[in-house]
Amino acid sequence: MKLVVQRVKETRLEVDGQLISEIKKGLAIYVGVAAGDTEKDVDYFAEKVVKLRIFEDENGKMNLSVTDIGGEILAISQFTLLADVSHGNRPGFSGAERPERANELYEHFCDKVSSLGVPVKKGVFGADMQIYQHNDGPVTIIYGDK
């Protein structure tokens, strides 16, 4: 599993010109599910991002989590995070999980984050999404090694 976590002031997601989801202050999380990932992997990463302290406290230090600030998460499925670009100029995606299983684990990630007390909005799995993002910082953290 690979996650790209970005601190945002606001993010909105559209499909075919229609607003699907939007959040104000919180995290935009791009979720790539790798072949062989399990619910245990998903639970681990969900707990990590909910506790990730990248929001500033009253002293300007990154010391607060999305939970601490009452923020939201927009979770966006993105299999291209698993691209292999080690050969040639065209990325390969053999390291990405098959779509049916990837969607199950993406939904599990969203459900787990929500169960940990953070409101979650979602993209549309497999859709051509347009994402409008107002990054804060910018602060970007990458989780995963696959």
Image (cartoon, rainbow, N blue to C red):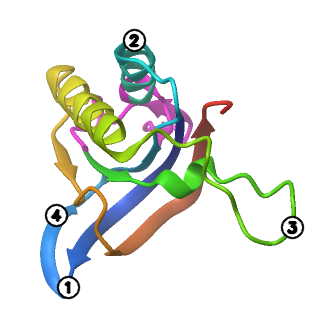
Residue pointed to by mark 3: 88
Residue pointed to by mark 4: 21
- Decide: few, some or many residues near mark 2? Use Cα within 10 Å; few <14, some 14-19, many ≥20: few
Q: Position of residue 81 (x, y in %)?
A: 58, 51
Q: Looking at the rendered structure, which numbered label has been put on residue 16?
A: 1
SS at circle 4? strand
Q: Looking at the rendered structure, which numbered label has been put on residue 56?
A: none
The answer to whether 145 is drawn above or below residue 19 in the figure is above
Q: Looking at the rendered structure, which numbered label has been put on residue 40?
A: 2
Q: In the rendered structure, are the residues bearing label 1 and label 3 in contact, judged by CB atoms less than 8 Å apart? A: no
**Direction top: furthest residue:** 40
Q: Earlier in the sequence, mark 3 or mark 2?
A: 2
Q: Earlier in the sequence, mark 2 or mark 1?
A: 1
Image quadrant in which you'd find residue 118: top left
* Residue range (magenta): 50-72
For marks 3 and 4, give the one nearer the viewer.
3
Q: Earlier in the sequence, mark 1 or mark 3?
A: 1
Q: Is residue 9 left or right of residue 81?
A: left
